[in-house]
Image (cartoon, grey):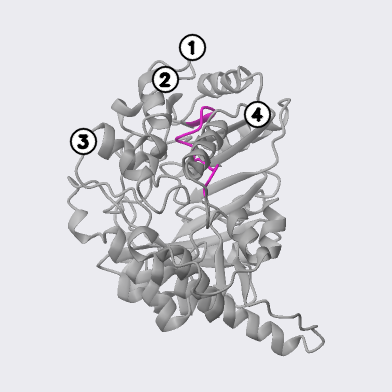
Amino acid sequence: MSNTLFEVDEVHYQILEGFLTGKTDTAPCNETFLNILHEKNVLVKPGEEKNLLQNCQYMRQAACFDNTHLALTICPTLSCNFRCPYCFEQSQNDRSTMNGDTTDRLITFIQSHHDAQHLDVTWYGGEPLLAFDIICELTERFKDLDLHYEKAGLVTNGYLLDENKISRLNELMIKSIQITLDGPREIHDTRRVLAGGGPTYDRILANITALLDSDYQGSFKIRVNIDRENMDHYIPLRNSLMEEFRGKKITVQTGHVQTEITSPYYNRTLNTDEFDNFNLGLFRQEGILPPGGFYPESYLGSVCLANRHMGFVVGPKGELYKCWEDPGKPEMVIGSVYNDEPVTNPVLRAQYTVGTDPFCDPECTDCEMLPICGGGCANKRLRAKEFGEEGPEYCTACKNHLNEHLEAYIRTFTTKELCKDLFDTKKEKKPDPGYRIISPQPEKRSKDV
């Protein structure tokens, strides 16, 4: 309930065992330790856990229906210059791009959210850089709105990210960029190919080099989509990239290729357990941490774009969706910026927010991972629970590998602690009470507060 991890000595372990078995006379329990156990909800009174879960559900709902932040993922085009075999996009051959009327309607749509104070934007597609002029135009118009517009993200294949576009990233307020490489050249060029055929690796790498040598001030990460066909090539790719861009601000991380069960690519993908085992193997063999590390972050009040009342994906014709997975699927459209009342499918919107609430699912309320997991992926939960689709795995990987995740976290934590102690010779040793909290760490708690 508090997502707190304790390290205890043998005496305090026996105290905990005593509470678990009902033999509380096995070891004396001092009042300070007892108070911490209650404070962190290790020990709860009858009925208290239900009340705590209800409070977590309230926090989730409050986050879902917050009306001060308008979050938009904008697809200025669904067209793409690549033909990746696993891509979910349904409309890669749709070459339509946002026109002037649609951009006007989008601005009107944003202005209609009178309670909004902040605007967050992610440029997506298709390949958004095919419509770079639209990105430039809309950014200038966003700056003129009576909203706090401070940053945007860009998800791109990187092929068109030339020096001219790189030189404008800062003024376009693009603070984060993600580019995909699916292996070394010989692997990547069999997967992420141009629409007309042809390799892409060398040009993408040249553009990455130009980006990292520029005055770009944001963050940059390379995503490597992992499946059965390229998993053995991840480490060589990562090592070569980290060596080539040594000293640069770069993150290389794994991405999980997931397709619908009807996709021809489905049998090539890893399931949730297999992908998690792959990341655990990277840590055990190479010391490589997955995105976010191994400790199960607490999502007590966090929600994604799909859950948020003020979250939308905007297509090139002004159509509105709730999730990044949905563009190009007519049945997943919830409305349009052209309508006076933009949302014309309120049932689908409600299904994404209320229908995916894990606190309303008995299977989830009986699971030890709630509320930490937050219910998992809303899109996959919707497809599995509401639409009866076979295949979507919406639960967190921690559910089946919690011990392995905690062991990996503890190993990382103690290693960092040992290194810090070796270099901090003046550190004052404090008396050891026989127990301590090792997650969330003190600096992390301060940041969260």
Q: Are marks 2 and 1 in contact (CB under 8 Å)?
A: yes
Looking at the image, tell me whether mark 2 or mark 4 is earlier in sequence order: 4
Query: What is the x, y in percent for residue 80?
Result: 38, 44
Kindly report which numbered mark, 2 or 4, lies closer to the viewer in this rendering: 4
**Which numbered tag is attached to residue 164?**
none
Query: What is the distance, in whole Å, between disc 1 and disc 3 at their CAs?
Result: 30 Å
Please name the residue that numbered disc 1 is placed on. Answer: 341
Write down the quadrant of residue 38 in the picture.
Answer: bottom right
Q: Which residue is outermost to the top?
A: 340
Which residue is at the front of the view, 3 or 201? 3
| Residue 174 makes an appearance in the image | yes
Looking at the image, tell me whether mark 1 or mark 3 is earlier in sequence order: 1
Q: Residues within 10 Å of mark 4 (few under 14, many from 20)?
A: some
Looking at the image, tell me whether mark 3 or mark 2 is earlier in sequence order: 2
**Which numbered tag is attached to residue 335?**
2
Looking at the image, tell me whether mark 3 or mark 4 is earlier in sequence order: 4
Secondary structure mostly taken by the magenta-highlighted segment of the chain: loop
